[in-house]
Image: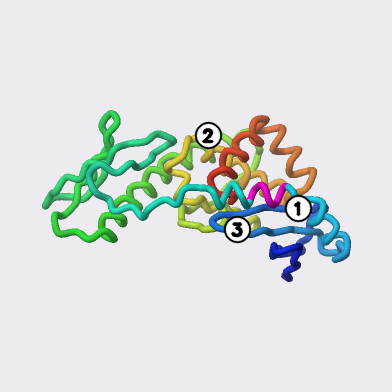
Amino acid sequence: MKNIKIEDIDIQVIKKGIKNMYISVHKPDGWVRITAPKRMKDEDIWKFAVSKLGWIKKQRIKYQNLEIQPQKEYVTGEKHYFQGRAYLLNVIYTNKKQKVEIHNNQMDLYIREDSTREQREKVMIEWYRSQLKEEIPKFIDKWEQVMGVKVNSFGVKQMKTKWGTCNTNAKRIWINLELAKMNPKCLEYIVVHEMVHLLERYHNKRFYAFMDKYLPGWKEIREELKSIGSLA
């Protein structure tokens, strides 16, 4: 891995065993990454970066203009998301089981009265995790039959730079916890994306041909995710 600089923009360059070159701009501050084939000459990477300079600047401006979201405090009246819908949080004190329930447009958080922000967050995170663990197997079962592949195991974890990952040797996929907050079509897209890696390890023409075959509208969903965080 190395860095190049064009004007005042630092660009991270990673070389992998792929056929094509890709560029991406990431939150929160618009950092830039180019992923290039291992044998690609530095001069060609430089030319590619220069050709994309206008696009890079537009993406960086977009991210810099995004409203900075305040840290959640997990108090009554806050807006929280689940499966693409917004809910108003309603904190309910209890000495019984701490949990989350949804009623109409309200998300009820049952919590100890003396709980800290971190403890409330933990209850919410575990609820989101449990919801994903219920939904993911449905998509895996569906697409195993379509693709003719087998997922040995899956997991859910918080990830800063990816929506999902796939260990092709172990046939294990990991899904970003944040997908619990988004429209289920986003979750399905990431599951399909990671399962396609069981057919093709790299992001090459063959990989994207599989994506076009199995999920024709995947590009629109990818753009939706990119507008959130450019992680996929």
Look at the numbered disc 3 and give the secondary structure of its residue.
loop
**For the residue carrying disc 3, how many other residues have a C-alpha within 10 Å: few (<14), some (14-19), or many (20+)?**
few
Q: Identify the residue under disc 3.
A: 170
Q: Which amino acid does label 2 sit on?
A: Lys
Residue 172 % position (x, y): 56, 54
Q: Identify the residue under disc 2.
A: 185
The answer to whether residue 77 is seen in the rendering is: yes
Q: Which residue is drawn at 26% across and 55% down?
A: 120
Q: What residue type is labelled 1?
A: Leu
Q: Which residue is drawn at 73% across and 69% down?
A: 3
Residues under labels 3 and 2: Cα distance? 26 Å
Q: What stretch is highlighted in magenta?
A: 55-59
Specify the quadrant that holds the N terminus. bottom right
On screen, residue 198 above or below 224: below
Q: Foreground mark, 1 or 2?
A: 1
Q: Foreground mark, 1 or 3?
A: 1
Kindly give the residue lying farthest to the left in the view shown: 95
**For the residue carrying disc 2, how many other residues have a C-alpha within 10 Å: few (<14), some (14-19), or many (20+)?**
some
Residue 107 % position (x, y): 27, 39
Q: What residue type is labelled 3?
A: Ala
On screen, residue 6 above or below 111: below
Residues under labels 1 and 3: Cα distance? 39 Å
Q: Identify the residue under disc 1.
A: 53
Residue 80 % position (x, y): 35, 42
Closer to the chain start, of discs 3 and 2, is 3
Look at the numbered disc 1 and give the secondary structure of its residue.
helix
